[in-house]
Image (tube, rainbow, N blue to C red):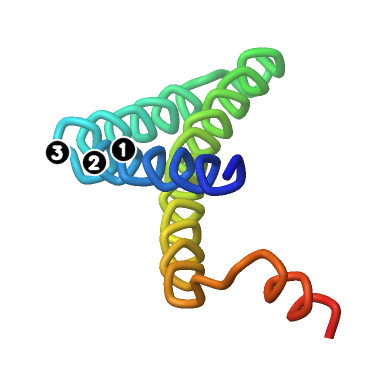
């Protein structure tokens, strides 16, 4: 039962992440953020290695955030598929144990 609730939580988080990724405000904001960071990075003096490192970190952070949301969506889809397969099987406990052993 605990496993099913975990799958439901992962599925719910995936659906919420999909709503964020589909939101036009988010799409525009993340695209603008990436462009702004790249432009600031390009404008940073060559001698300013600390500034360049900071812009690189910000660029990587923005990419990581976007990737995490996409990963949540994929994990949610996987959890939904797993739940639907489990529903189709609808096996009792003994049969599940035997299937895993055999």
Residue 4's place in the image compared with 35, above or below, is below
Report the residue at 51% width, 76% height from top. 89
Q: Nearer the viewer, residue 61 or 46?
A: 61
State the mark number for residue 69: none
Residue 87's place in the image compared with 52, above or below, is below
Q: Marks 1/3: CA distance?
A: 15 Å
Q: Earlier in the sequence, mark 2 or mark 3?
A: 2
Q: Marks 1/2: CA distance?
A: 5 Å
Query: Horizontal and vertical percent for residue 71?
Result: 50, 49
Residue 75's place in the image compared with 61, above or below, is below
Q: Quadrant of residue 99?
A: bottom right
Query: Horizontal and vertical percent for residue 21?
Result: 28, 43
Query: Helix, strand, or loop for circle 3?
Result: helix
Report the residue at 39% width, 29% height from top. 39
Query: Horizontal and vertical percent for residue 18?
Result: 30, 46
User: Marks 1 and 2: CB-CB under 8 Å?
Assistant: yes
Q: Marks 2/3: CA distance?
A: 10 Å
Q: How many marks?
A: 3
Q: Quadrant of the C terminus?
A: bottom right
Report the residue at 67% width, 22% height from top. 53
Mark 1 burial class by Cα count in 10 Å: few <14, some 14-19, many 20+: some
Q: Nearer the viewer, residue 78 or 84?
A: 84
In the displayed structure image, the side of residue 95 where residue 64 appears, left or right: left
Say which residue label 1 marks: 16
Say which residue label 3 marks: 24
Extreme residue toward the left, this view: 24
State the mark number for residue 19: 2
Query: Horizontal and vertical percent for residue 62?
Result: 48, 31
Q: Quadrant of residue 49?
A: top right
Q: Nearer the viewer, residue 21 or 48?
A: 21
Report the residue at 44% width, 33% height from top. 38
Mark 3 burial class by Cα count in 10 Å: few <14, some 14-19, many 20+: few
């Amino acid at each position: 039962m605990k496993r099913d609730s975990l799958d439901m939580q992962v599925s719910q988080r995936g659906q919420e992440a999909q709503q964020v990724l589909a939101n036009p405000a988010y799409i525009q904001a993340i695209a603008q953020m990436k462009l702004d960071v790249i432009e600031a990075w390009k404008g940073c003096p060559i001698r300013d290695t600390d500034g360049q490192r900071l812009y690189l970190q910000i660029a990587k952070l923005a990419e990581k955030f976007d990737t995490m949301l996409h990963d949540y969506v994929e994990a949610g889809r996987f959890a939904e598929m797993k739940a639907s397969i489990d529903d189709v099987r609808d096996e009792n406990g003994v049969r599940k144990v035997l299937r895993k052993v055999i």
